[in-house]
Image (cartoon, coloured by chain):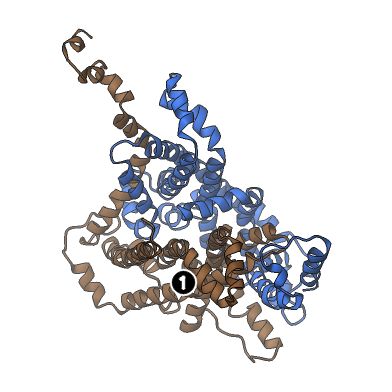
Chain colours: A blue, B brown
Amino acid sequence: MTDAIVQPTAGGILHDSTEGMSYLDTLPHRIVATWIPLSLILIVLLFPFYWMVLTAIKPDEQLIDMEHFNPFFVVGPTFKHIHKLLFETQYPHWLWNTTYVSVLATAVSLLASVLAAYAIVRLRYRGAQWVGGAIFLAYLVPPSILFIPLATVVQSYGLFDSPMALVLVYPTILIPFSTWLLMGYFKTIPFELEECALIDGASRWQILTKIILPLALPGLISAGIFSLTLCWNEFIYALTFITSVQNKTAPVAIVNEFVDGDIYRWGALMAGALVGSLPLVILYSFFVEYYVSALTGAVKE
Amino acid sequence: MSEAALVPGRQIAASRRTGWQRLVSHRDWQGFWFMLPAAAILILFLAYPLGLGVWLSFTDAKIGRPGEFVGLDNYDWLSDDTVFWMATFFTVGYTLFASTVKFIIGLYLALLLNKNLPFKALLRSIVLIPFVVPTVLSAIAFWWIFDSQFSIISWSLRHLHLIDRNINFLGDPWNARLCVIFANIWRGVPFIAITLLAGLQTVSPSLYEAATIDGASRWQNFRFITYPLLTPIIAVVMTFSVLFTFTDFQLIWAMTRGGPVNATHLMATLSYTRAIIGGNLGEGAAISTAMVPFLLAAIMVSWFGLQRRKWQQGSE
């Protein structure tokens, strides 16, 4: 809390960065009305992660003996759980499965979405508006009502228990979202650019690859990052379509393979959750702006 | 090419091209080729299964055995099934309660973040982390936080002398329900806060200045400026939030698997249990199909809410 009190005063005195009517807020009012509730919400939002990290590096005896050790801190942190996870289980393999499926599915969806979004926005073929609406509706169809019939479809195509099933099914979540996002980006590119290129004899394909895509690069990155996180996050399809242990994705494997009656399982479970989240958090921290624009862009339209 | 000369008028341009050229250069055909990959995937893996799901719900399909048409038997069976009704009521209650709280806290957080704060961008990135981390993994963390023996919450309350024995968070039906709702709210608030924040940032501060000069209170500022300008984005965000809450699966599956005694089954988890674990694809499909009317209702409400607001504001 001391940080929270110091920062606003320092900001207020050193340079005049007031916006709108914020100069009307007195310091005590700001602390009560802004900083206290904000800190409370942030603590609640972040506590599970603190707890996850703490449990992952705590020695077993401290985990279950809460009377002699204060559970909020760790004495003599250990990497035993993480070491065990990475070298004694198939965890690296599951992480690789997740990465492989996510990257392939994202690539497939981006390709399909770029073509579809371009066609809807710029080719304006007959019925393009209806197709745009249909794609938005497809966005609203949740996986929870599709997984049963999809299981029979995947079975009949002979893809059951194969990562390829996920690579083909994940785009149904990603394409509607990416297409919708890219349509917004393509609309902002001036039509005149394309007219010039058409007059100079460029084909539609050349226009798309040489003019539109370079200009819509931020949109592509946003769609790509968001798609990767959606794939990484996906659970119900991966749980239903993949049965053999070595083909599982990390989120499913943690829930199914690490849960036994062992009282000491928590260290390994939390280490698994931590290591499974880290790649996404790192990716996210590098591309925060793109991620946020993907999140808000898809809603704003 | 010689035929083309015989055709008079405006048809020349079209018929001068061969069939192949028309396939690659006519606008509608070009549109078709560009749409093909997306359409193929969406039709094969989205539209077709959607229809197939409805069909399966009228059959007695089991895993590994295509079913036969049995009419409304599955629905008939479900209508006498107390577990199904409990799951349906809990799903509706879970959605309404969690969405309302998420909306209130999310809007409040968005308003807080919209103030003139130092490290605004950093705060925004931190707030979004619960949304970025895979749901199952944070659900496992909650499972541990709500453990019956080693819960940190029980421990803290015991040491504050507020309770004298551990709370059985996930073992008691009502406690378990509240816990999964709490976890859902925790996961959903960042999404709502950040998207509403994006909406708030488009509201010009001069509106508030003008209103304040005219004597408007803080509440009036919110009620008559922020809220009306934010309504369209609220409608969209809440539609998504309601849809995703209603069809939630991962959180429940990782925390309770529907237990204790089916108390926390959502329709999605129940249909998974019946269809994939129990093997009754038809019955599971019927539960999934029973979710559709609720989803449609949610979409309709927000859609017409949005339309009415637009009409009131005089646009379109």
Kindly identify which chain the residue marked by label 1 belongs to.
Answer: B
Q: Is residue A63 above or below residue A216?
A: below
Q: Which residue is mark 1?
A: B99
> Going by the picture, which residue comes out furthest to the front?
B214
For residue B44, side relative to residue A59 (left or right)? left
* Residue drawn at the location 66% of the way across and 78% of the way down: B152
Q: Percent from the top left, x then y, of residue A237?
A: 42, 54
Return the residue nearer the eye: B172 or B131.
B131
Q: Percent from the top left, x then y, of residue A284?
A: 62, 51
For residue B127, side relative to residue A4 (left or right)? left
* Residue drawn at the location 63% of the way across and 51% of the way down: A288
Q: Is residue B122 above or below residue A161?
A: below
Q: Is residue B271 above or below residue A110?
A: below
Q: Percent from the top left, x then y, of residue B248?
A: 44, 65
Task: Classify mark 1: helix, strand or loop.
Answer: helix
The answer to whether residue B80 of the structure is visible from this angle is yes
Q: Is residue A219 above or below residue B254?
A: above
Q: Amino acid at mark 1?
A: Ser
Return the residue nearer the eye: B118 or B315.
B315
Q: Percent from the top left, x then y, of residue B203?
A: 56, 61
Q: Quadrant of residue B186?
A: bottom right
Count the labels in the image: 1
Q: Quadrant of residue B79?
A: bottom left
* Residue drawn at the location 42% of the way across and 79% of the way down: B263
Position of the N terminus of chain A, as image quadrant, is: bottom right
